[in-house]
Amino acid sequence: MSKPLLTQEQQKEYLLSSIRKQVVFNYPDKNKGKRTGLLKHRSVVFSADFPEDGITYWDILDIIRFEGEPEDELRFTYYRYKYKEGINLRGKPIKLGWNFAL
C-alpha cells in the first residue's frame, strides 16, 4: 500500500475546518425535507485505524444551529478516511487521493 497523503493530524485539521460553515441535513423521511444551518462547534476523536485497508475512522460530535430553530442541536456521526486508487483512460493505475465519507 502507498504511503498516506495526509497524517492523522492533517485529517483532524481537515475535519475541524468545517466549523463556522453552512451544513445541510436531509432527513431520511422525505416529509421532513432538508434543513440548513451553521456548524458552531465540532469535537473530533480518533476512533480506529486499519492501515492494511488504508482506512481511518473518526468519531464526530457537531453542535449545529439550524435556521429558524431557537436552540442548538447535536449531531453524532463518524467519518471514514479511505485511500482510493483508480485506473486512467490508458489503463494505468493512478492515485485519486483520499475520500472522506460521512
Image (cartoon, grey):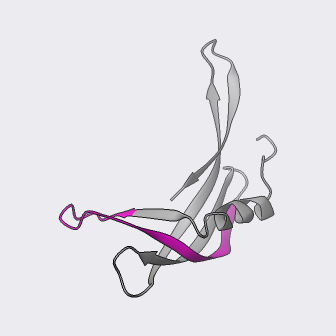
Q: Main secondary structure of the magenta part?
A: strand
Q: Which residue is at the far top?
A: 90
At a point 77% along the width and 59% down the height, the residue shown is: 10
Residue 101 picture location, percent across and down: 53, 54
Residue 44 vs 33, above or below: the answer is: below
Residue 60 picture location, percent across and down: 57, 73
How many numbered marks have been drawn onto this rendered protein structure? 0
Side of 84 where 38 appears, left or right: left
Work out whether residue 25 or residue 95 is closer to the camera in this orientation and state it.
25
Side of 62 where 34 appears, left or right: left
Residue 19 vs 73, above or below: the answer is: above
Extent of the magenta region: 25-49
Residue 23 picture location, percent across and down: 47, 64
Looking at the figure, which quarter contains the N terminus? top right
Work out whether residue 87 or residue 69 is closer to the camera in this orientation and state it.
69
Work out whether residue 64 or residue 12 is closer to the camera in this orientation and state it.
64
At a point 69% along the width and 60% down the height, the residue shown is: 14
Q: Name the quadrant containing residue 93.
A: top right
Residue 102 picture location, percent across and down: 50, 59
At a point 42% along the width and 62% down the height, the residue shown is: 24
Q: Is 39 included in the stretch rendered in magenta?
A: yes
Q: Is 59 included in the stretch rendered in magenta?
A: no
